[in-house]
Amino acid sequence: MESVPVRCPACRRDHAYITPVYPCPCGSPTAPPLMRGASAVLITHRTWNDDWVSVRCHSCGRRDQWPHPELCCPCGAVLRIPVRPVATRGTTAPSTTSATAGSPGPSHIPLPPTAAHPRPTFRPLVIRTARDAVDTAALYLQWLGFRHVVQPETRAGSRIGLRAAGLIAQVDATTRPTVLRDVECLWLNALNASVAGVLFSLAGYTDEARSRADGLAVPLFTLDLTGTPQPVNGPADELVSAGPRPPAPGA
């Protein structure tokens, strides 16, 4: 892991920053290349483009978008760590980032088929309450092939998480469409845990949320009152047809 000295421009405190490492879809560890000697930037206003940085895998040449390295100083300042830009190379594999303008993020890798036999027909559960929505999502995830789906004992609020082997899911049982922030938060939580992320919503999704989910390969499902989840984007369609990813070796 690469480490660089960082000085906070607000309080002048010195830090040793270690860049985060992310798993490339080819399996190789990948990290944003930090710029030694460059001053950290104090973040006072956020924009989506500034929060992401292009990173090229040294093993396969794949180019993806990852969160821009940041450091939180004890004085309360949030610092953006300068990153070397990715150089254009004439003989590399073509970029596999999302082609949707304004929707950076790791591109979608089709899920490999895992089911040896066709699934039986899903038996819906009529939704009358937020708890019914969570129960339906849990049953549907089990039907898709995820094992050991766990529901939280405390069901506070209308946005409730589910967990399974290799999965984090969120169920939005509110009456407003799920927004972009919910997609981003789920994706980052799943990325940090090295698992897949899935969203279920009773009221659907905003256009921005659907666009971002496409770019980040987050499967989106809607829940109607009959209790039958419906895929609303490409990653969700592929999850339904292919099932969950097989566990990584040694997992």
Image (cartoon, grey):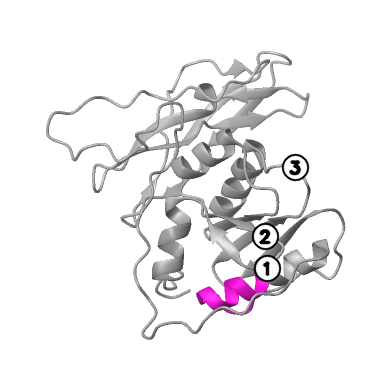
Residue 227 badge: 1
Q: Residue at x 81, y 53 (%)?
A: 158
Q: Residue at x 76, y 67 (%)?
A: 127
Q: Marks 2 and 1: in contact by CB < 8 Å?
A: yes
The quadrant in which the N terminus is found is top left
Location of residue 190 (image quadrant): bottom right
Disc 2 crowd rating (10 Å Cα; few below 14, some 14-19, many 20+) is: some
Range of residues picked out in magenta? 137-149
Q: Which residue is mark 2?
A: 224
Position of residue 242 measured from the top left corner of the image (x, y, whole percent) = 39, 69
Q: Amino acid at mark 1?
A: Gly
Q: Is residue 229 magenta?
A: no
Q: Residue at x 66, y 13 (%)?
A: 9
Does dot 3 land on a helix, a strand or a loop?
Answer: loop
Position of residue 183 measured from the top left corner of the image (x, y, whole percent) = 60, 44
Work out how far the residue at label 1 is from the one at label 2, CA to CA, in angstroms.
6 Å
Does dot 2 land on a helix, a strand or a loop?
Answer: loop
Q: Amino acid at mark 3?
A: Arg
Q: Earlier in the sequence, mark 3 or mark 1?
A: 3
Position of residue 175 measured from the top left corner of the image (x, y, whole percent) = 78, 47
